[in-house]
Image (cartoon, coloured by chain):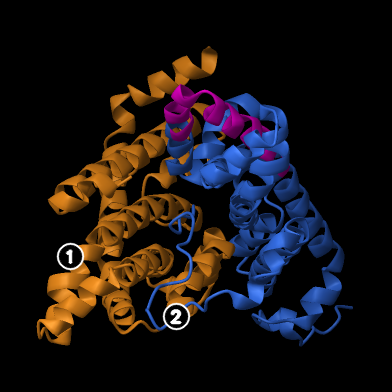
Chain colours: A blue, B orange
Amino acid sequence: MTAPPPDDCLAHNDWICGEYLTTRRQILLDAVAQHIQLTVVSVALGLAIAVPLALLARRWRWTLGPVLGITTVIYTIPSLAMFSLLLPVYGLSATLVVIGLALYSLTLLVRNLLAGLDGVPVETKEAARGMGYGPMRQLLAVELPLALPAAMAGLRIATVSAVALTTVGAIVGYGGLGNLIYAGMNSFFKAQVLTASVLCVLIAVVFDLLLLGVERLLTPWRRAGRTARPRVRTAGGAVGRRPLTASGRRG
Amino acid sequence: MNTLSSVWSWLTTAANWSGENGVWHRLAQHLFLTFACLALSALIALPVALALGHLGRGGALAVNLANIGRAVPTFAVLVLLLLTPLGRYGQWPTVIALVLFAIPPLLTNAYVGMREVDQDVVRAARGMGMTGTQLVWRVEVPLASPLILTGVRIAAVQLVATATLAALVGGGGLGRIITAGFHLASTPQVVAGAVIVAVFALLMEAAFELGQRWCAPPWARRRIR
């Protein structure tokens, strides 16, 4: 009494399959939830370490070299190797993935924070001092807000990269949508691989837009001049603004 | 520590370095993949970047390509390509994925480098009667060379990382030591493989950094970070 084999896109192993979405809804939602959780926790952890580190490097200049050096070394190590190096410490756990991703975001955030703080005009700092601002108030009320656009750019890059890199966590079983991609690879399940990949990119885009919105909310003074901003290609032929980190990403 | 000593003994066992799955063979595969794909992606990306930069067109494309490349997971692309009909042709899915991810840094940096050339210099060169081709090869490319080389360095380090991930989809390279270690549930092998990959990536970065200093014209050496 075997039922006739179903003749649908799952049976044909099509790339795009509506059946897959309806029958695997819960698996997909769980994977998305895990993916978002891993990303958010790791970027938040990276941020929590990056801010004090950047302030430290700015306060005591001699720490700048080591801080930048170590972050460069971390960023150069491929993700698969990074997760593997953490294996003896954390075992096959979500913590391993979170720590690995946090280390990468840390790097991007520290560099952008420092670039932002360095970009605060000397005149502005002097004006703050002249108005009687102490070092702490100057930092909190003047320098950090002015460094915010660069820091937010770093946060956006770090978050988008973390979303993509989380997939590699599949090697230890905690990769969010990466788990589905990994399983789909082993069973040649095309719909699963494509759906999970598309969802990954979607999550990255949504996070990027959310952070862009937050940035606009936090920096109302930048909106005023937005309409007057020069186009990317002007008569003089200058490119808009040079991208802050010259397009690095990690595989 | 126990793990450290077992990692050390893995690394010092001669049998782990020789043969088809040995470190030397994997290293050779990794080097070949990295440089072959670097050459391929440079052949594709640099002419496009130089042309676009010279003409001052497609700026949004060149700059956004980097952002798009960042949002797409390397692992996903590797698996997607493996499942396409291309997957039957051995290393080709890996090569294509590697080239795809090496193009954005090359293209973006070369483009920005070309556009950042001082427009006064360009006008002076035109005033001297240089043709477009002369302008590109004698003025713009030399002046843009520091950033072009930065792009090459970033792409190379990127390729090392991507080639490591290729092991997850059965590609050759040093990553295979790590994935084999996971399959064997051998933590020492996983960590030893990771150490080798990390050292290799750092050496690559250092080598390109040095190469960048040597290749750069004297006046630009200060500017390179």
**Chain at tag 2:** A
Q: Secondary structure at mark 1?
A: helix
Kindly give the residue lying farthest to the right in the view shown: A1
Q: Quadrant of residue A29?
A: bottom right
Do labels 2 and 1 touch, CB within 8 Å?
no
Residue at mark 2 to residue at mark 1: CA–CA distance: 22 Å
Quick check: B98 left or right of B142? right
What is the chief secondary structure element of the magenta stretch?
helix
Query: Label 2, on which residue?
Result: A233
Residue in front for this viewpoint, B90 or B41: B41
Query: Magenta segment range?
Result: A44-68
Q: Does the stretch in magenta take in A59?
A: yes
| A86 in relation to B3, above or below | below
Which label lies toward us, 2 or 1?
2
Q: Amino acid at mark 2?
A: Arg
Query: Number of labelled discs?
Result: 2
Q: Using the image, determine if residue B129 lies above or below residue B93.
A: below
Place of residue A72 in the rendered image (x, y in percent of width and height, measured from the top left): 44, 39
Name the quadrant containing residue A4: bottom right
